[in-house]
Image (cartoon, coloured by chain):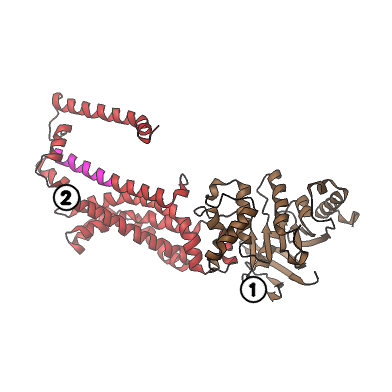
């Protein structure tokens, strides 16, 4: 049996359910008297996606840039902080309470400050996404680097390996599945952050499109923007899952 | 044999714990000659594993002197192979890469040791498994790979911490025979063999493998008896059924349960 037939066997209930939902939605709007500005029909959303006067290419591009930027920032900062925490108890004592404090802040509340400090642009929105998504990476990196058999570390010491070598050859690969698992959460958080940032201050991007539909009551465009957001989010999430399979195939099912 | 490779003189080990200091080892004096196979047996918590780590230089002794190959041990000693109860293979590396790990950690040229690694794997019955990941091997096979890893740099001293403790009884007996074969019981002169310090809680295993069995008591660990195993080598499966084997096992067993005076 090919992969495709296997997949179609597994997912046909999803596809059927989705088709039924779409059809009943269309029928409800067309014949049920629901007003278009409250709930646009699937056909109206389709038209907004392909035939409207929204410049989707530009908005999708901007938001994608912000999401990827947020993801990369969160990954780099998160791994760096996690390594620092695992490397020295002094760093851990200094950083952990501070990071916990930052994590308990509702990040959305900081967004207006970002506007004051950095003005409009894609960078503050990247930063918002990074702020929401970096914490799990810090924690999982630190845990992955320290959750290791003491015997394994003794093995390194038996051969008089320098600390950095034990780190690179034993600790870091050990942490990789933990880090990749956190990056899946970060991928989702980056999307949230970028959109929230655009809500607060932006002139382009999918979040901006949604905000503008509020005044025009153009809900079909808002739905179309939602679809684009989920497409970008799913692609990023899929890329992380794929990377996990490629780089840490030994950790399958170990999360 | 007069040349002692390991010399412990009145070694004490005390741990600091939350509920006060715990004395793990008290007054351990022990001498192991080059090429000797010595087992440490004792109940759980008698500090036999700690003793092994003190010899390796991984833990400092609280009191007393530790000498290996004529040098006082303060830091991890060079030229030693260690095998633990768990195989502790790196699960992201193939078996071959795992066996080659000591070379990488010690900063040695890996390329030259590739051939030796393959020879060791062949000798351990792991031919054809070099490119497998650890999870694709059984527990016994993983432990053989761990033994290959310990032997890669051809250390004169092998420290083994309950290496077969996690295996089922049959695999365990097989591994014992295999270890003796790899040790060179049949084809090496005594002086050419590696010195082995072997921690176990199985009396039968200790008697079967060793030249000497050092019996330890629990908390704090002290040496209760040092029993010479004068059974002929190479050891065979039949030996386990012999009267001499049974007599030695009983002697050690009685020492462990504190009724040694009856036979000693």
Res B117 quadrant in image: bottom right
Residue in view at x 25 percent, y 57 percent: A126
Q: Position of residue B3 (x, y in %)?
A: 78, 72
Q: Is residue A136 left or right of residue A232?
A: right
How packed is label 2: few (under 14 Cα within 10 Å), some, or many (20 or more)? many
Residue in view at x 19 percent, y 51 percent: A61
Asked whether the residues under marks 1 and 2 belong to the same chain, the reply is: no
Predominant SS of the magenta segment: helix
The count of marks equals 2
B61 lies above or below A234: below
Q: Which chain is brown?
A: B
Res A114 quadrant in image: bottom left
Q: Are marks 1 and 2 in contact (CB under 8 Å)?
A: no
Q: Can residue A203 be seen in this view?
A: yes
Is A185 one of the magenta-colored residues?
Answer: no
Bounds of the magenta segment: A217-233
Is A230 one of the magenta-colored residues?
Answer: yes
Quadrant containing the C terminus of chain B in the rendered view: bottom right
Given the image, what chain letter belongs to the residue carrying mark 2?
A
Q: Which chain is red?
A: A
Residue carrying label 2: A59
Q: In this view, does A168 lie to the left or right of A208?
A: right
Residue B74 is marked as 1
């Amino acid at each position: 049996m090919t992969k495709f037939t296997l997949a179609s066997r597994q997912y046909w209930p999803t596809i059927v359910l989705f088709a039924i939902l779409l059809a009943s939605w269309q029928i409800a709007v067309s014949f049920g008297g629901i007003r278009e500005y409250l709930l646009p029909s699937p056909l109206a959303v389709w038209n907004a996606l392909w035939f409207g006067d929204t410049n989707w290419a530009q908005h999708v591009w901007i938001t994608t840039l912000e999401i990827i930027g947020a993801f990369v920032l969160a990954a780099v900062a998160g791994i760096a902080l996690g390594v620092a925490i695992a490397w020295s108890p002094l760093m851990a004592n200094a950083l952990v309470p501070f990071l916990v404090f930052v994590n308990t802040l509702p990040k959305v509340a900081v967004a207006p400050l970002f506007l004051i400090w950095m003005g409009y642009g894609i960078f503050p929105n990247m930063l918002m996404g990074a702020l929401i998504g970096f914490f799990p990476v810090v924690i999982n990196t630190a845990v992955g680097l320290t959750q290791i058999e003491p015997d394994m570390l003794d093995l390194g010491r038996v051969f008089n390996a320098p600390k950095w070598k034990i780190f690179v050859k034993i600790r870091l690969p050990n942490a990789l599945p933990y880090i990749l698992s956190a990056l899946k959460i970060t991928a989702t958080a980056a999307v949230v952050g970028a959109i929230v940032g655009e809500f607060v201050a932006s002139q382009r991007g999918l979040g901006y499109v949604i905000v503008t539909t509020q005044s025009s009551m153009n809900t079909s465009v808002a739905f179309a923007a939602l679809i684009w957001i989920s497409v970008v989010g799913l692609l990023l999430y899929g890329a992380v899952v794929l990377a996990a399979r490629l780089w840490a195939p030994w950790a399958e099912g170990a999360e | 044999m007069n040349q002692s490779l390991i010399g412990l003189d009145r070694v004490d080990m005390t741990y600091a714990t939350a509920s006060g200091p715990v004395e793990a080892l008290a007054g351990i004096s022990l001498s192991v000659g080059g090429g000797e196979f010595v087992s440490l047996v004792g109940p759980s918590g008698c500090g036999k594993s700690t003793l092994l780590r003190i010899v390796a230089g991984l833990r400092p002794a609280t009191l007393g002197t530790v000498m290996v190959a004529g040098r006082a041990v303060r830091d991890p000693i060079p030229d030693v192979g260690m095998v633990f109860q768990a195989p502790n293979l790196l699960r992201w590396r193939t078996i071959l890469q795992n066996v080659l790990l000591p070379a990488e950690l010690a900063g040695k040229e890996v390329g030259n040791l590739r051939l030796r690694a393959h020879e060791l794997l062949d000798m351990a019955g792991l031919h054809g498994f070099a490119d497998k990941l650890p999870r694709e091997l059984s527990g016994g096979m993983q432990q053989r790979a761990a033994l290959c890893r310990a032997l890669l740099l051809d250390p004169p001293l092998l420290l083994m911490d309950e290496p077969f403790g996690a295996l089922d009884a049959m695999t365990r007996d097989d591994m014992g025979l295999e270890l003796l074969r790899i040790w060179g019981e049949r084809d090496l002169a005594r002086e050419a063999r590696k010195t082995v310090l072997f921690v176990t809680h199985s009396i039968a295993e200790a008697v079967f493998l060793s030249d000497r069995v050092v019996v330890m008591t629990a908390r704090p660990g002290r040496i209760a008896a040092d029993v010479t195993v004068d059974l002929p080598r190479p050891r065979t499966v039949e030996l386990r059924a012999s009267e001499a084997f049974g007599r030695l096992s009983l002697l050690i067993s009685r020492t462990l349960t504190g009724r040694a005076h009856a036979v000693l």
